[in-house]
Image (cartoon, helix red, strand yellow):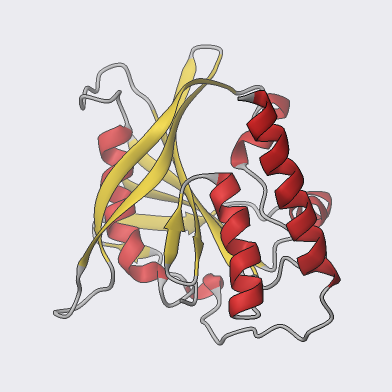
Amino acid sequence: MLTRILILTACLAAGTAVVAKSSKTEVVPARQSLASFPLEIRDWHGRDDEPFAPDILAVLGVDDYIVRTYRTDPRAFVSLYVGYYESQRQGDTIHSPLNCLPGAGWEPVEKGYLPITVQTDIGSGAQQQNIEVNRYVIRKGLDEQVVLYWYQSHGRIVANEYRSKLFMIYDAVRLNRTDAALVRVIVPRRSDEADGTGGGTAQAVAFVKAVFPLLGRYLPS
């Protein structure tokens, strides 16, 4: 298993290096700015959180992003982060959200994949789509949170980070595009909730179902 991981990592590193050195002008499709993403989504009422500090933005390398808190009542709230990268050729690549957890004091205690059935768009012509996202439970002291996240590019939803990198290389050659986004939803896990997969998961899934049909305007396919 370790040998396979090392081989895959080496292949990804080599492929990423080839993509980064490509001199072709990359296609950047038109899209709406994430700043115009709705603050009102069904029963959820959102507000912008504090913007990231310049040093954090320098590390992320993100071209457009939002970080917001949505609430339905004082006890029910969800944190939403969407980070969009116009290009990943110059070293600004998407990193797993798990990379920053230990530094913030959070540790993963549960991990896995979660299937969700979503609508692809709003309106009468919307179709259903089955997607798979990462589900983590993280803990700091007595506090626990449910984290759902995925990588989204060109209409493709990918949970696995390595598969996301492989698709980036594939699309760079096929479409001359390396734009992509990370979508992350965080919900507190409360001990008085029970939804079969841990308190908070049902609320996070409900929010993903509400948000997903809107993303296509801001994350081009």
Left or right, 28 with respect to 203, comes to right
- Tell me the residue at 76%/68% (across/down): 19
Occupied quadrant, residue 210: bottom left
Up the image or down, 198 lies above or below 43; here it is: above
Q: Is residue 19 left or right of residue 190?
A: right
Residue found at the very far top of the displayed protein: 142
Name the residue: 60% across, 67% down. 170
Residue 1, can we see it?
yes
Tell me the quarter of the picture where residue 199 sits.
top left
Q: Residue at x 49, y 72 (%)?
A: 154
Does 2 sit above or below residue 132?
above
Name the spot of residue 15 as percent of width and height, x first.
Answer: 74, 59
Residue 35 place in picture, x, y as percent: 55, 71
Q: Nearer the viewer, residue 121 or 37?
A: 121
How many marks the image carries: the answer is 0
Return the x and y of residue 61 as percentages of the image width and height. Answer: 76, 59
Q: Quadrant of the N terminus?
A: top right
Q: Position of residue 59 (x, y in %)?
A: 80, 51
Q: Is residue 73 visible?
A: no
- Quadrant for residue 18, please give it: bottom right
Q: Residue at x 57, y 46 (%)?
A: 161
